[in-house]
Amino acid sequence: MLLFAFVTYYTATLLAECYRTGDPETGKRNYTYMDAVRSNLGGAKVVFCGVIQYANLVGVAIGYTIASSISMQAIRRAGCFHKNGHGDPCKSSSNPYMILFGIVQILFSQIPDFDQIWWLSIVAAVMSFTYSSIGLALGIAQTISNGKFMGSLTGISIGADVSSTQKIWHSLQAFGDIAFAYSFSNILIEIQDTIKAPPPSEAKVMQKATRLSVATTTIFYMLCGCMGYAAFGDNAPDNLLTGFGFYEPFWLLDVANIAIVVHLVGAYQVFCQPIFAFVERRAAAAWPDSAFISRELRVGPFALSVFRLTWRSVFVCVTTVVAMLLPFFGNVVGFLGAVSFWPLTVYFPVEMYIKQRRVPRGSTKWICLQTLSVSCLIVSIAAAAGSIADVIDALKVYRPFSS
């Protein structure tokens, strides 16, 4: 996790330097990740970047839909366990919660530039701190109650439930999960475009923000992960707050899961707005005189056009249906993290930095950067293999819309 944090932070600083082409304060702005790749690398790499970036963003939307429904389902189950006892299975389908989440997203997707609302980051930070702190506190409390640290330094024990092969695949999938947890590079340029600068330059501000955010999240990731394992050992649930390692206090679990849902409602829009903007720019360029695309009706914070209402609603509906078809969140997350980590977090930032700073081929710096890139490619391939193996296992007992 510390290695992923370091690599993500370092390559994010390289990517931040690519927001402007040429002079870091007065050079041409690149408003999107694809614009930066187009300005610095060009050619087929622009298409490759676009396919990977937008496919990843679609995957994130699906993953967030699944995650939010799991938290909403956990709220209902926590109340059921409290009322009927832990012996009651309290089974329920997550599909209605996915549909509810989708309806909310159709509504919010009609607000233009929702991702640039000034208070959105504050709400996200408060929600993240809330559920992370609750998860950490419950893990510490459980460890104290146990009177010892559960688990071992070598991880889950090999036995009847887990074979050595499964442990290897799960360990590789964990790389993908960690990569997904640090996957903000795919929208870093778009976020950087909202910074009011210079002076100092947008790159300096973004690098400082990245340093603070990566340090903060890593501390919480390490604490929650370590204390969760210390509390439950081999029996640690996939998700501390929804896997019911804890049953009480049920109201505290509800608060944590409500915070997760609120956070994901905003995060969904932050990750989807670049997709919305890309499609709408292309449509406006292709049919500039079409009233279907250009005519808008302003109603409060909403900017309604027939095209925006249709296209964004269809997008949300499709991601919701796919989420209902693929309810195994952990497997999906690992695969998304593995597939996008190398190209978006490492390869393109390194290549653009080399091109922009004219790093001599064969120099010590060039060799170090390329070694970093190749090493991360190997990690991504291994993580993807582990995630695919896990998805295949999940599909063996999978029934559509049965979550």
Image (cartoon, helix red, strand yellow):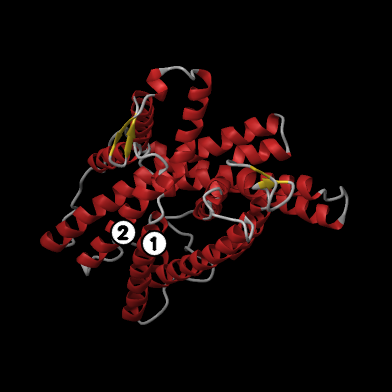
Q: Amino acid type of disc 1?
A: Ser
Establish if 2 lies above or below 373: below
Residue at 57% x, 50% y is: 185
Q: Earlier in the sequence, mark 1 or mark 2?
A: 1
Q: Relative to the observer, which residue lies in front, 185 or 392?
A: 185
Q: Relative to the observer, which residue lies in front, 331 or 72?
A: 72
Residue at 41% x, 37% y is: 395
Q: Secondary structure at mark 1?
A: helix
Relative image position of residue 170 (x, y in whole percent): 50, 52
Image side of residue 55 versus residue 39, left or right: left
Relative image position of residue 238 (x, y in whole percent): 39, 56
Residue at 83% x, 51% y is: 359
Could you say which disc has been placed on residue 353 in the image? none
Q: Amino acid type of disc 2?
A: Ala
Q: Secondary structure at mark 2?
A: helix
Q: Quadrant of the N terminus?
A: bottom right
Q: CA distance from mark 1 to mark 2?
A: 7 Å
Give the quarter of the image for residue 401: top left
Within-10-Å neighbours for mark 2: few <14, some 14–19, many 20+ = many
Q: Relative to the observer, which residue lies in front, 264 or 375?
A: 264
Residue at 64% x, 53% y is: 16
Residue at which label 1 appears: 128
- Evaluate whether residue 22 shows in this view: yes
Q: Quadrant of the C terminus?
A: top left
Question: Number of callouts in the render?
Answer: 2
Establish if 38 lies above or below 123: above
Relative image position of residue 206 (x, y in whole percent): 59, 58
Relative image position of residue 231 (x, y in whole percent): 38, 72
Q: Are marks 1 and 2 in contact (CB under 8 Å)?
A: yes
- Evaluate whether residue 4 shows in this view: no
Residue at which label 2 appears: 259
Within-10-Å neighbours for mark 1: few <14, some 14–19, many 20+ = some
